[in-house]
Amino acid sequence: MPSLSRRNLLHDRVRFAVTLTGIVFSVVLSAVQLGLFVGFRRATSDLIAHAGADVWVMSRGIGNLENAVAFPEQRLYQVQALPGVAAVQKHVIAFGNWKRPDGAEEGCLVIGVEQGGTMGGPWNLVEGTERAIDAPDAVIVDALYRGKLGVSHLGQVVEIRGRRARVAGLTRGIRTFTTAPPVFTSFKHAQGYVGLREDQTLFLLVKAVPGVEPSALAARIEASVPDVTALTREAWMARQQDYWMFGTGAGVSVLIAAALGLLVGVVVVAQTTYSSTVDHIREYGTLKAMGATNGYLYRVIVEQAVTSAVVGFAIAIVVALAAAHASQQGTTAIVIPPAMVAGLFVLTVLMCVAASVVSIDKVTRIDPAMVFKG
Amino acid sequence: MLPALSVRQVTKSYGQGPGAVHALRGVDLDVAPGEVLLMMGPSGSGKTTLLSIMGAILRASAGSVRVMGEEVVGLPERRLPSIRLRHIGFVFQGFNLFPALTAAENVAVALDIRGVTARDAQRRALAALDAVGLADRAPHHPADLSGGQKQRVAIARALVGEPGIVLADEPTAALDSQSGRLVMDLLRRLATQRQRAVVIVTHDSRTEAYADRVVHIEDGRLREAA
């Protein structure tokens, strides 16, 4: 027996198209917003995730990566002396002022990597080498921000906070959540670019001895070194993400937009399913008179909703993935991981089933005697 | 022989007290297997109400209604669909076919409701259409069928579940005289050959020739035709 619900959907093609448009709009909006959320979240903590440090040490009370407070670099030796520490590096991440060749100024995020260090350096290099930043005045920038920074070629000379800087390499796909492009340089140059004294650092990156639990090491550092906070990579990433996503409200607005997308979907599907049910009310009455149970009628309506959900989702996810792919060329990435696709599919089906509840209620109340009225 | 349908002292009232409307007032009626009963009467006389009660669609206010020996008055609401499913086939004035389905699928719906597998339903639906002379119209949608053909599809749908009783509400009202004759021929033949009890509500006096018995209903009371 062919599905009555699917036949009804195809019979009312205009209504089906309206339903699908609503679902596609809803799912694309939600997927893109959630993808932006994931992309933003990732961008806030990419520098921590890729640094390769097990524990980050910073001045006490720091809430986010970009607003660290300087502390004496002697702390490095105190940390180095603790058991369980394999390596320690000084590190800088702070805002700086980039002067483009045309004289315009742009904010940038200066990342200072200790010479010869193994942690905190650039990745995804497309031109130059990681160690290029060890050369005098050398900086590595990301290709996504070339236009913003006015970088036309390798070797170009610019200024950061009035000091000379020479572009020695390019990465691709290292984004920051703020509008400030990342600029990798040596620790010594970074001190100058962000106005630190020579005996100051903003972070210490710590590598634990294999087998040592990073959380235990972080606790040991906090207990032994005065005025510092030590966080494992995961804890620091979480704090950074929470700060930008929820502390600033930026993530909340993206999530609200995603929720609104789903709500639009519920309303559109509910409206079209209901009007379809009303249009077919006599058919439902006939089924009821013939002896169909309410359960049978619910199945017809829910099948109709689920079919709409599956077809609409299939179209929408192709559009959303295409948008995500295209976004990889820009500074704002839409990231749609497989788990999100699966989650959105479940949500879409639930949304459509929930939207059919009003119709189910309508069908439940049908008086089968209506079939004898004209 | 036990009647397929037995109605005893059935009343149906809407509302209570002095303002109550009495649609049926103590109706008694038996319909035997193989019998075609015509129920006639003016509009508002109560014939559709009686048909609905006999079809376990509407509940009687009092009295007894036995469908294939099963008492339905007093049964809980949730048990009534099962009575209709097992014992009763309906034919409606407006055909009530599903426009999105083909003729064969319209018939198969009645079996789908009963949980018959798709393949079996398809086979039986085609056989039912063949029985009403519409095998060649099986793949067509209702919009492509004439009024008479639609009603024959509806009759095939009513009969495909092998019910003991067929209740038809004005089955010829929307048809021209030739189609009406075809439909009545068919109902008559089905009653005789398959021993179905057929109750037809109609205004159409031309159908009397096909009936074993004619009853008139007026003001909720039944009287046998002379």
Image (cartoon, coloured by chain):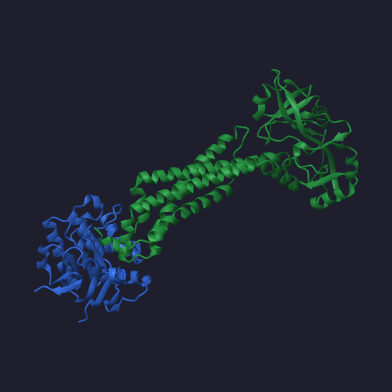
Give the x, y percent position of residue A146.
66, 26
Quarter-of-image position of residue A98: top right
For residue B148, above or below residue A147: below
Please tell me which residue lies in front, A251 or B111: A251
Q: Is residue B156 left or right of residue A50?
A: left
Left or right of residue A363: residue B203:
left
Q: Chain A shown in which color?
A: green
Can residue A84 be seen in this snapshot? no
Residue furthest front in the image: B18
Residue at position x 56%, y 37% in the image: A325
Q: Quadrant of the C terminus of chain B?
A: bottom left
Please indicate, yes or no, whether residue B46 appears anywhere in the rendered image: yes
Residue B175 location (% of width, % of height):
16, 56
Report the front residue among A172 and B152.
B152
Q: Which residue is at the far top?
A: A102
Residue A138 locus on image (x, y percent): 77, 26
Query: Which quarter of the rendering shows the N terminus of chain B?
Result: bottom left
Residue at 47%, 43% in the rendered image: A24
Within the image, what quadrant is residue A100 found in?
top right
Quarter of image, res A58: top right
Q: Colour of chain B?
A: blue
